Amino acid sequence: MSQSALITGATSGFGAACARRFAAEGWRLMLCGRRQERLDELRAELATITPVHAFALDVRDEAAVNAAIAALPAEFAAIDLLVNNAGLALGLEPAQRCDMQDWEDMIDTNIKGLLYCTRAVLPGMVERNRGHIVNIGSVAGNYPYPGGNVYGGTKAFVKQFSLNLRTDLLGTKVRVTNVEPGMAETEFSLVRFKGDESKAGRIYDGAQPLAAADIADVVYWAATRPAHVNINRVEVMPVCQAFSPFAIHREA
């Protein structure tokens, strides 16, 4: 039987690209996200080439996550790969002007949602002594930038949690990978700026950012290494992006 993958946040961006990449290789897919219409469209597209189980889910709701995993059809119940992709950035204001609700939403989705999905799936992987958890982190978890405050903090959590999770799983055959994208052109900036297309578009002006398919290729590569190989983390940037000098404020 082909392998199966559960992909969160599958309605756009990296999640949808991962769904297409794994479907093309014959993996059975479990796709979830908050937008039912988009899930239906993706399921209709991919169900012609591989079995697909799609269901609406808000990963911030722990009870809903547990219920959805418990209710998986028998042919999907043994999850080989969990791609914790659901996440978002909100706002780019300095900390003293940020909206506290934006901070709460990022923590609830990027940290708690990832934890709920991992905890719901992990016992089955350990019991079967196989499986792979791929977390979608960010270079923002490694390098600070103005306005990155809580978003960067959540992705730093993802990085350290991934390492600690791997440590807990020592002695099993369950693998853990953290994929850390840099600038990528998806709906990410549109969400960050709450639908302001002009602000979102300026992020990519004059640059050639990563595409969602680039990250899907990295996730697929990590997931298809030989069973004895664990890719701990992969940091990926477009060629047009690098590192800035230290910032220094000078008095006039």
Image (spheres, grey):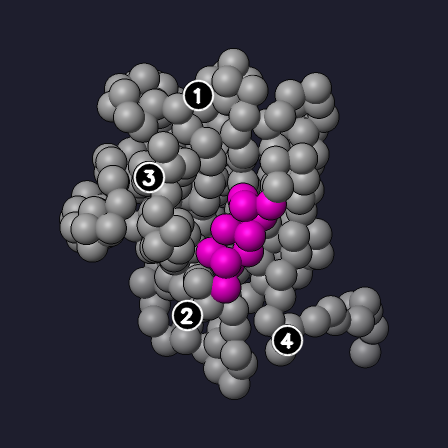
Q: Secondary structure at mark 4?
A: loop
- The image quarter in which residue 66 lies: top left
For the residues carrying marks 3 and 1, which lies nearer the camera in this image?
3
Q: Secondary structure at mark 1?
A: helix
Residue shown at the point (74%, 71%) measured from the top left: 244
At label 3, the amino acid type is: Arg
Q: Which residue is mark 2?
A: 200
Instruction: Return the residue nearer the eye: 128 or 64.
Output: 128
Q: Which residue is mark 4?
A: 239
Task: Give the Cα separation between the discs numbered 1 and 2.
Answer: 34 Å
Task: Give the Cα separation between the discs numbered 4 and 1.
Answer: 37 Å
Q: Which residues are magenta?
A: 214-225
Mark closer to the chain start, 4 or 1: 1
Q: Is residue 20 magenta?
A: no
Mark closer to the chain start, 2 or 3: 3
Residue 28: mark: 3
Q: Residue furthest front?
A: 1
- The image quarter in which residue 167 lies: top right
Instruction: Return the residue nearer the eye: 234 or 172.
Output: 172
Q: Disc 4 vs disc 1: Cβ atoms closer than 8 Å?
A: no
Q: Residues within 10 Å of mark 3 (few under 14, many from 20)?
A: many
At label 2, the amino acid type is: Ala
Mark closer to the chain start, 3 or 1: 3
Residue 120: mark: 1
Task: Give the Cα separation between the discs numbered 3 and 1.
Answer: 19 Å
Mark closer to the chain start, 1 or 2: 1
